[in-house]
């Protein structure tokens, strides 16, 4: 027992002050970090099905342009946003919905019916009717939405 | 390791002398009332820290102020905590600063050679009240709006120049976007600058002169 190293009052106080100080600092720092990085951790949106329109409008084998309004919440601001979607069907039963946003740098592509291809004016990128890259800088095919058809209405999942 | 880095730095920066002057200075036998100044300083640091964090989400315009505050409180993780610390810290700050002042008055600590410390403290009290007044408007809710309507009206009461002062404070005849923006500017730029400079000066004097002892009977 007498071999135990004695701790002086001064050393004890010193350690206690640093410990309490460290605890208070952590109590501030941890919530602060969570608070600052929160937007990066949250999932973008709630997913929801958005109605595009009637399947009657879609020509067989030709991408058809649909526009839909979606609500997008960023922080405390809710915006109405219009999205454009090309819908393609080869057999009238299976539908593919493609975003018109170029996968290169986010310009809007458009369907050129004479040449049967999508064209992006920013860097002359070309996609075929299924959205596969034919030429130009895009790193991947056009993004697709999940689709479903109910009562002859096409829906896409936005999220 | 820590000692070696400390020595290396001390040789070049001389921090140990500063550290010792601040934390190892001699003080007379005093009581807990003498911690009120340090407590005020701690809350001031709390206000600075949480205030800076709040500006990351807060927007000082009438169409976004209220919504951004609600967003902080209900949506941002720990936002309720950061805002709560700033909100309650503001009240604690005013209370502590006043108690600190009362201790200085009752112990006669404002006397020679500490008059200038006292003067800077009086201005710091006014700055604290200024923080409270300008910060109260920022959430832009009903209470904030009407409290500031009343508060600024008081600024308009002096004869002759009252109306002019009122228009300066509000940035116009009515409480508006201009009022909110200037209250925000004063709250986050003007007052903090004064607070930091004066607090540094105040503490320099406290350290340089040393704190007063509790007065004895018959002194």
Image: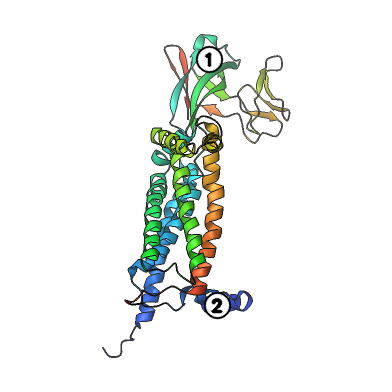
Q: Nearer the viewer, mark 2 or mark 1?
A: 2
Q: Which mark identifies residue B17?
A: 2
Above or below, A129 against A19 in this view is above
The residue most toward the left is: A1
Residue, x 53% and y 68% (percent of image)? B204
Q: Is residue A43 visible?
A: no
Q: Secondary structure at mark 2?
A: helix
* Residue count near mark 1 (Cα–Cα under 10 Å), binned few <14, some 14–19, many ≥20: few
Horizontal and vertical percent position of residue A6: 33, 85
Which corner quadrant of the image does residue A46 belong to? top left
Residue, x 63% and y 76% (percent of image)? B12
Q: Nearer the viewer, residue A15 or A137?
A: A15
Horizontal and vertical percent position of residue A48: 43, 26
Above or below, B185 against B113 in this view is above
Q: Which mark identifies residue A125?
A: none
Horizontal and vertical percent position of residue A109: 65, 24
From the viewer's perspective, is B65 left or right of B98? right
């Amino acid at each position: 027992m007498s071999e135990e190293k004695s701790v002086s009052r001064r050393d004890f106080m010193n350690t206690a002050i640093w410990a309490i100080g460290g605890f208070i600092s952590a109590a501030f720092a941890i919530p602060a970090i969570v608070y600052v990085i929160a937007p990066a951790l949250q999932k973008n949106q709630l997913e929801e099905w958005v109605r595009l329109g009637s399947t009657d409008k879609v020509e067989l084998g030709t991408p058809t342009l649909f526009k839909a309004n979606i609500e997008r919440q960023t922080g405390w601001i809710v915006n109405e946003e219009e999205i454009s979607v090309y819908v393609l069907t080869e057999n009238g039963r299976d539908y593919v919905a493609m975003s018109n946003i170029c996968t290169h740098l986010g310009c809007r592509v458009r369907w050129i019916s004479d040449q049967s291809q999508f064209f992006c004016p920013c860097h002359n990128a070309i996609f075929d009717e299924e959205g596969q890259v034919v030429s130009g800088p895009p790193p991947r095919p056009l993004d697709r939405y999940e689709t479903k058809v109910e009562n002859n209405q096409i829906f896409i999942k936005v999220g | 390791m820590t000692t070696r880095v400390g020595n290396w730095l001390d040789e070049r920066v001389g921090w140990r002398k500063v550290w010792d002057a601040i934390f190892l200075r001699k003080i007379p036998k005093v009581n807990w009332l003498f911690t009120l100044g340090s407590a005020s300083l701690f809350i001031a640091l709390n206000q600075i820290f949480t205030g800076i964090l709040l500006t990351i989400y807060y927007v000082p315009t009438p169409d976004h102020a209220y919504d951004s505050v609600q967003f902080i409180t209900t949506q941002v993780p720990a936002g309720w905590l950061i805002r709560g610390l700033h909100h309650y810290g503001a009240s604690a700050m005013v209370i502590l600063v006043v108690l600190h002042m009362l201790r200085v008055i009752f112990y006669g600590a404002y006397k020679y050679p500490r008059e200038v410390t006292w003067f800077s403290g009086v201005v710091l009290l006014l700055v604290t009240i200024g923080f409270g007044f300008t910060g109260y408007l920022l959430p832009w809710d009903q209470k904030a709006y009407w409290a500031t309507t009343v508060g600024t009206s008081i600024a308009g009461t002096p004869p002759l120049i009252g109306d002019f002062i009122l228009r300066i404070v509000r940035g116009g005849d009515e409480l508006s976007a201009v009022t909110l923006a200037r209250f925000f500017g004063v709250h986050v730029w003007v007052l903090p600058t004064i607070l930091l400079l004066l607090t540094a000066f105040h503490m320099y004097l406290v350290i340089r002169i040393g704190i007063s002892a509790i007065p004895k009977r018959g002194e």
